[in-house]
Image (spheres, helix red, strand yellow):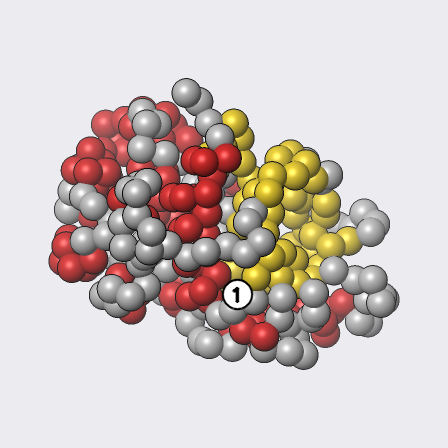
């Protein structure tokens, strides 16, 4: 693919990340890329193996699937509106077409029943759901008596964090070293632009998880925390982490271990602390640069946005 096409698609992907529930019509996205709708759709399909419409719909439905499970008391109407659908009926029809279940049916199926998940949800990453050892027993069913959950040591705390700006590039988790590769590419931009210092903080951002998204489509941002205002440049996206309260804990381990810690945080620790997730996103700040040391061997501080749980 021509470099200018790759840069146009990257720019559009960044735009979608920031505007998923807003206007992401083909015409709007083609305007962002500065191509005609017809030409842009061909470029996007070649690069992503999905049309822009299919890509946006999948992201919205996968977000909705997360919301249905993570926020069991959130009305379907609110989920539909919060994921960019024009009405609950449009959402329900699209969800059923994609998952072969209504949103209400999807919400009721136990997540720990991995065989049922694999059968019913062909869109889910079976490499994870068919491995019964991956999901701690009882934790995914909100069983507060369950003891078989990942222990977070020391336990998570809730802290207030200021907003930060992050320069990052997008990758997917289709390869064991995808995160390392992404940080190496990032450093090729960071160093010439003189943004690297001894105090540079490296940050990863989970936009998707392999529960409802296949690894080759799981979006992960590899970035650095900026100390100055910068505008987006070519393949680099500038995003912000919002000021607010975050559940914070440290750990070292591979991707599966990170996800297990996040499952345990959401289904065990947060409830006891009187909090719930405020947004389905996770930031991880690395003690060392993942471009030069394997992800599995680096200590990282995980931040998950939270809010006070409603009684």
Q: In the image, what residue occupies the spot 65% across and 47% down?
A: 239
Position of 83 with respect to 130 (left or right) is right
Q: Nearer the viewer, residue 59 or 223?
A: 223
Image point 45% across, 76% down: which residue? 175
The residue where tag 1 is placed is: 171
Q: Position of residue 229 (x, y in %)?
A: 81, 47
Q: Quadrant of residue 180?
A: bottom right
Q: Position of residue 274 (x, y in %)?
A: 49, 30
Q: Looking at the figure, which quarter contains the C terminus?
A: top left
Is 163 situated above or below 255? above
Residue 300 at least partly seen: yes
Decide which of 204, 288 is in the foreground and name it: 288
Determine which quarter of the picture holds residue 137. Answer: bottom left
From the top left corner, tell me how far across and down residue 154 is, in percent.
58, 54
Q: Is residue 63 above or below residue 122?
A: above
- SS at mark 1? strand
């Amino acid at each position: 693919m021509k470099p200018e096409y790759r840069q146009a698609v990257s720019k559009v992907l960044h735009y979608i990340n920031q505007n998923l529930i807003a206007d992401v019509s083909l015409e709007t996205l083609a305007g962002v890329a500065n191509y005609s709708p017809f030409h842009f759709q061909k470029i996007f399909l070649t690069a992503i193996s999905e049309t822009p419409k299919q890509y946006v719909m999948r992201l919205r439905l996968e977000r909705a699937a997360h919301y249905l499970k993570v926020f069991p008391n959130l009305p379907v109407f609110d989920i539909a509106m919060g994921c960019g659908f024009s009405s609950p009926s449009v959402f329900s029809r699209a969800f059923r077409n994609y998952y072969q279940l209504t949103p209400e049916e999807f919400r009721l199926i136990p997540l720990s029943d991995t065989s049922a998940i694999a059968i019913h949800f062909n869109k889910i990453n079976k490499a994870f759901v068919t491995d019964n050892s991956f999901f701690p027993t009882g934790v995914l069913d909100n069983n507060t008596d369950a003891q078989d959950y990942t222990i977070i040591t020391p336990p998570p705390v809730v802290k207030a964090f200021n907003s930060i700006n992050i320069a990052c590039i997008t990758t997917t988790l289709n390869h064991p070293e995808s995160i390392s590769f992404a940080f190496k590419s990032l450093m090729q931009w960071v160093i010439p632009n003189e943004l690297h210092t001894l105090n540079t903080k490296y940050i990863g951002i989970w936009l998707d998880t392999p529960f409802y998204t296949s690894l080759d489509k799981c979006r992960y941002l590899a970035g650095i925390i900026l100390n100055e205002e910068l505008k987006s440049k070519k393949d680099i996206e500038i995003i912000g982490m919002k000021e607010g309260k975050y559940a914070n804990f440290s750990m070292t381990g591979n991707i599966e271990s990170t996800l297990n810690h996040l499952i345990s945080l959401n289904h065990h620790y947060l409830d006891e602390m009187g909090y719930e997730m405020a947004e389905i996103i996770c930031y991880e700040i690395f003690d060392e640069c993942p471009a030069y040391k394997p992800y599995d061997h680096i200590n990282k501080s995980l931040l998950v946005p939270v809010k006070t749980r409603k009684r």
